[in-house]
Image (cartoon, helix red, strand yellow):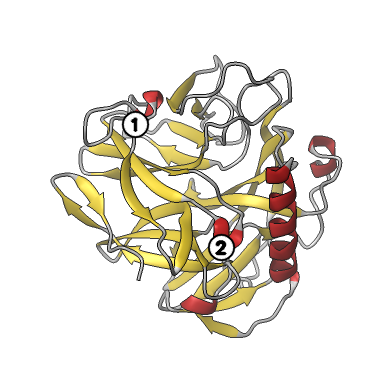
Amino acid sequence: MKLLKIRVIFFGLLFVYGSVFSQETLPINETIVHDPVMIEQNGTYYLFCTGNGISVFSSADMKQWKKEKPVFPEAPKWGTSVASDFKNHIWAPDISFHNGQYYLFHSVSSFAKNTSAIGLATNKTLNPSDKNYKWQDNGIILQSVPNRDLWNAIDPNLVIDEKGTPWLSFGSFWDGLKIVKLSPDLKSIAKPEEWHTVARRERDFKLEDENPGNAALEAPFVFKKDDFYYLFLSWDFCCRGENSTYKVVVGRSKEATGPYLDSDGKSLFQGGGTLVIEGNKNWSGVGHNSAYTFNSKDYLVFHAYDSKDKGKPKLKIKQIRWENGWPKVDPMD
């Protein structure tokens, strides 16, 4: 119950930050975001993150960010069928470009429950000035239900494997992170269904199924580099401001579906994970990352809780370097 209260208070504050629309341009260290993902179109970087209607920012240089209008000015109609308390606060989007259009997966949920669903919106362009700019709501892709599912349908990430097969990874707490095969149009689960558990941590077996449990992991993101798929994920606790303990770990596999192993050879399915970045006295927790290649350079994009600014979540972008086939980034300053 204490965890639930902390998350409600924190996301209430994040809702306020994310609801105020202003086209003021802010430097990266003043840009408040949670669960950021990024993409580039025609020289402009677009960033999507948790917020009212899905918060959107744009930038020409990844250093100065302008707030844009949200994806959903009005709440998707299906949201309240998933979570009765839904008021258009949408979590953890994922943006990618395939089949000539942009795909924006996103999450609707209730705090500390797996009363959750992953939805999909599509658009031909990300430029709000383009005449073709219009987000199309494609409804629910998959849904988790308490006491039926021991997984949580939030934190989606799309990956297309070398064979052109689309997979959606997702998950938070419960029995770990999953990946499921999608249909070719990316708008539904493929038939026959194919599911894999790609990462988990030990869960107390005495817990009721509706309890999120003590296996603190979430936010999978699969990044292909050379011969490997790299599964990034966040361990421990977000959403506690200055008391957050988030950190990013990684494993790698020859297949998008796993098995993913850490640098010591331990499977992420058995609790393995190689540390990529963690917080310090200035940044109490860092996590919910994404990873991209822009202009032949690889970047880790994530949020970090600013201990010197009341624990507000700030945007962070760090260049990735590779050592013996493993991602490395500079520690937090």
Quadrant where the image shows the N terminus: top right
> Can residue 230 be seen from the camera position used here?
no
Question: Looking at the picture, does residue 52 appear above or below residue 7?
Answer: below
Asked where in the image residue 232 lies, by quadrant, the reply is: top left
Quadrant where the image shows the C terminus: bottom left
Q: Position of residue 30 (x, y in %)?
A: 54, 78
Q: Position of residue 275 (x, y in %)?
A: 32, 46
| Residue at the image point whose x is 75% and y is 60% from the top | 12
Residue holding disc 2: 242
Specify the farthest residue to the top: 192
Left or right of residue 24, residue 98 in this image: left
Give whichever of 23, 324 is nearer the camera: 324
Q: Are marks 1 and 2 in contact (CB under 8 Å)?
A: no
| Residue at the image point whose x is 32% and y is 50% from the top | 276
Give whichever of 55, 267 is nearer the camera: 267
Left or right of residue 188, residue 321 in this image: left
Q: Position of residue 265 (x, y in %)?
A: 22, 28
Left or right of residue 240, residue 64 in this image: left
Q: Amino acid at mark 1?
A: Gly
- Choose the circle earlier in sequence order: 1 or 2: 2
| Residue at the image point whose x is 24% and y is 62% from the top | 296
Q: Amino acid at mark 2?
A: Glu
Q: CA distance from mark 1 to mark 2?
A: 26 Å
Residue at disc 2, secondary structure: helix
Q: Residues within 10 Å of mark 2 (few under 14, many from 20)?
A: many
Q: Residues within 10 Å of mark 1 (few under 14, many from 20)?
A: many
Residue holding disc 1: 272
